[in-house]
Image (tube, rainbow, N blue to C red):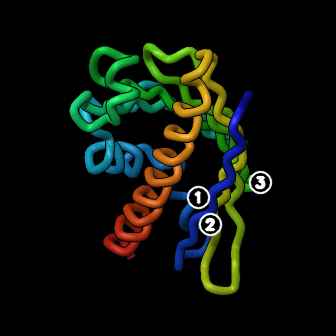
Amino acid sequence: MARRIEHRTTSPRPARDVYAALVDQTYLRDRLAALGGTNPELVAFTTTDQTTSYQLRQGVPADKLPSVARGLLGGDLVIDRAESWTEAGRTGTVEVTLNGVPGRLDGTITLVDTASGSELTLTGQVKVGIPIMGGKLEALIADQVAQLLDKETEFTAEWLARRA
């Protein structure tokens, strides 16, 4: 059974500024350096007039993982995250896989202007195909994704402010 995830973050910056950062290679590398954990890497980056796609790899040391995850993985966690954005609608898709875990997160991302700046919303589902443990891991992954999105939003606001 999959766990639904919906998480919103807000920024004081307009959507066009946030979007410009989210599809900027320098920003992605800076964000990985600040938040990427062990051996962060911008694995791939492709841009056209209509879309930008990239793949990020981030690591979490085993000693920073909850015991249930440490026991399952037997080592560090490696997160592969692929995002594809379309400029016209400032919408995107995200796919996240984890080494050693038969599961994934799939979702859509929307970025819209608000009266006070902008709002980014991730809507998707986390699915882990492990009997008995799957539900616990799905909840853990959903919680960690929400925390990461909050940290990334804070980083983005600071990164944009330094360039204003």
For the point 54% across and 58% down, which residue is it? 20
Question: In whole angstroms, how far apart are the C-alphas of marks 2 and 3?
Answer: 11 Å
Three-letter amino acid code at disc 1? Tyr
**Depth check: 28 or 71 in front?**
71
Three-letter amino acid code at disc 2? Arg
Circle 2 sits on which residue? 16
Please provide percent x and percent y for residue 106. 67, 33
For the point 43% across and 62% down, which residue is it? 156
Please provide percent x and percent y for residue 133. 54, 23
Please provide percent x and percent y for residue 75. 27, 18
Circle 1 sits on which residue? 19
Question: In whole angstroms, how far apart are the C-alphas of marks 1 and 2?
Answer: 5 Å
> Which label sits on residue 9?
none
Please provide percent x and percent y for residue 16. 62, 66
Q: Residue furthest left?
A: 63
For the point 55% across and 67% down, which residue is it? 17
Question: In whole angstroms, how far apart are the C-alphas of marks 3 and 1?
Answer: 11 Å
Instruction: Give the quarter of the figure containing the C terminus.
Output: bottom left
Dividing the picture into quadrants, the one containing residue 110 is: bottom right
Instruction: Give the quarter of the figure containing the N terminus.
Output: top right
Above or below residue 114? Residue 20 is: above
**Depth check: 74 or 136 in front?**
136
Circles 1 and 2 in contact, beta carbons < 8 Å: yes
Circle 3 sits on which residue? 88
Q: Give the secondary structure at mark 2.
A: helix
